[in-house]
Amino acid sequence: MRVEWVVPRGPKVFEQLDSEDEKDEKDKVSVGESVGVYFLILGVAFVSLLAFIILGNKPHGFQIASLISYSCVVFVYTFFRTRGINTRHSLEDEYVQRCLPRLLVIHCIYLAAVYFIVDGALSIRPSPSAWWQTSSGAKGMPPFEFVLFLVVGAIAISQVIFSRTILSRSKKELSSDETAERQ
């Protein structure tokens, strides 16, 4: 018996967060917005690279550079439309302004978790066997770094989903309040 895996075409990780009204917004993405988000992501990559270069050899520098990179990525994927995310949450909108204090507290909790995970991983780094420390090929990443990358990535995805859910609910509540006031 042969088992085949069916993989959906295109990333649709975040589409379940979009309500029916928000799904209509996906057609309104302009070329300028797409190019702007692309350059924003390139800027985040550049800032992250600089942070790791500048802070890499300082005490707790790797952890701080990780937090800078993490914060930039979470900000982009929470507030901007990217591939698989069809809604944008402008910082100028009233519902976003209402949620910002809560989102900042949540972000600080996630930052603390990321800091302690990265710090703990770096403190146990010399302990595992050599297999965990060496890459398997010319372009391969050592398993230790790969697992750390996956764990921090999973934390970032959970924060983005959690934050976008809060923003979507707040937007829905605000629109229902405005509808009730009109009637």
Image (tube, rainbow, N blue to C red):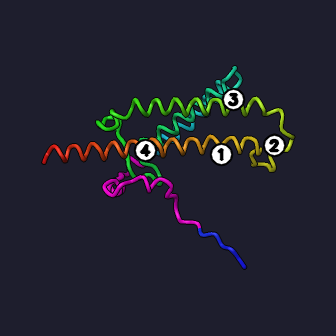
| Crowd class of label 3 (few under 14; some 14 to 19; many from 20; radius 10 Å) | some
Give the CA separation, mark 3 to mark 1.
15 Å
Closest to the observer, 163 or 91 = 163
Query: In the figure, is residue 176 to the left or right of 84?
Result: left
Give the CA separation, mark 3 to mark 2.
17 Å
User: Which quarter of the image is occupied by the N terminus?
Assistant: bottom right
- Amino acid found under the numbered disc labelled 4: Arg
| Crowd class of label 2 (few under 14; some 14 to 19; many from 20; radius 10 Å) | some
Which residue has dot 1 on it?
150
Furthest-bottom residue in view? Answer: 1
- Report the span colored magenta: 7-34
Closest to the observer, 106 or 61 = 106
Which residue has dot 4 on it?
164
Residue 59 shown in magenta: no
Query: In the figure, is residue 42 to the left or right of 102?
Result: right
- Amino acid found under the numbered disc labelled 2: Trp
**Pointer 3 or 2: first along the chain:** 3
Residue shown at the point (51%, 41%) measured from the top left:
159
